Image (cartoon, rainbow, N blue to C red):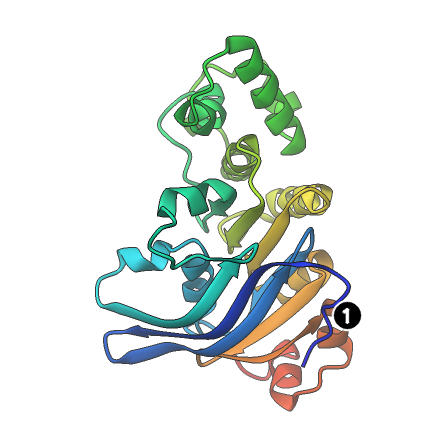
Amino acid sequence: MENSNWKKPVYETNGLNLWYGSSHALKNIDLSINEKEVTAIIGPSGCGKSTYLKTLNRMVELIPDVNISGSITLKGENIFDKSIPVEMIRSKVGMVFQKPNPFPKSIYENVAFGLKIHGIRNKSLLDRIVEESLQKAALWDEVKDRLHKSAYGLSGGQQQRLCIARCLAVDPEVILMDEPTSALDPVSTHKVEELINSIKNDVTIAIVTHNMQQASRISDRTAFFLNGEIIECDQTTTIFNNPSDPLTNDYINGRFG
């Protein structure tokens, strides 16, 4: 189905099934997410993309009546192992949502928030990491003169880059992005895509997107989900230019979804 030997998997999913009550939302998912790559997850609405993403950092368990079988490992450790605190997983795995969700704090405090939770109090160290994270998120030049003003004063695109800076500050191994540009205008979308390209050599990224052009522009590998199953997963160039399954071809060419 795929040849992913050339990069080491960070996440490995085997035989994952998930039910919301009696509704079978994910069916026998086998998928690896490789180190320092962008993996795009595409497919029509309701096909299980966001559910899968939320399973990777155990957010899906916040929903009542969820049942899960199969395994997901993060760097070889079973994320469902009761001895592994969910907070430990989430400290390694950042999440960026469809709608920017800055905290009702200053720009500076948004980025420093996770660092302070991890016990960092040294002001010069906080200052340095906040600046580095905003630089990486291509936001520093736009906000350096108003770090102590509310994050709510930023535009939607700036807020989304701030949320990515907030993730980067705690040095995660993975960032999960659930349609991070769907609420943004084309200029802001382009900036977020540039940002993803600039950080992918430092961090592993999995991104759910409805936008086929976006998936083809920014991802190394693409997984196509349909009705809770993976139809096909391969190098992005293969998926878009020479897919092996006719359903993939039909979806990419806009025949459904």
Residue 212 found in image quarter: bottom right
Question: Residue 79's x, y, as percent?
Answer: 43, 57
Does the rendering let one see residue 193?
A: yes
Which residue appears at 53% of the width and 17% of the height?
Answer: 126
Badge 1 local density, few (<14 within 10 Å), some, or many (20+)? some
Question: Residue 237's x, y, as percent?
Answer: 77, 70
Question: Residue 11's x, y, as percent?
Answer: 56, 59
Which residue appears at 51% of the width and 10% of the height?
Answer: 123
Q: Is residue 108 left or right of residue 34?
A: left
Q: In this view, does 110 lie to the left or right of 133?
A: left
Secondary structure of the residue carrying tag 1 is helix
Q: Which residue matches tag 1? A: 237
Q: Taking 46 as reference, is 216 above or below it?
A: above
Which residue appears at 60% of the width and 42% of the height?
Answer: 188
**Quick one: which residue is furthest to the front in this view?**
83
Q: Front-most of 110 and 126?
A: 126
Q: Is residue 99 left or right of residue 146?
A: left
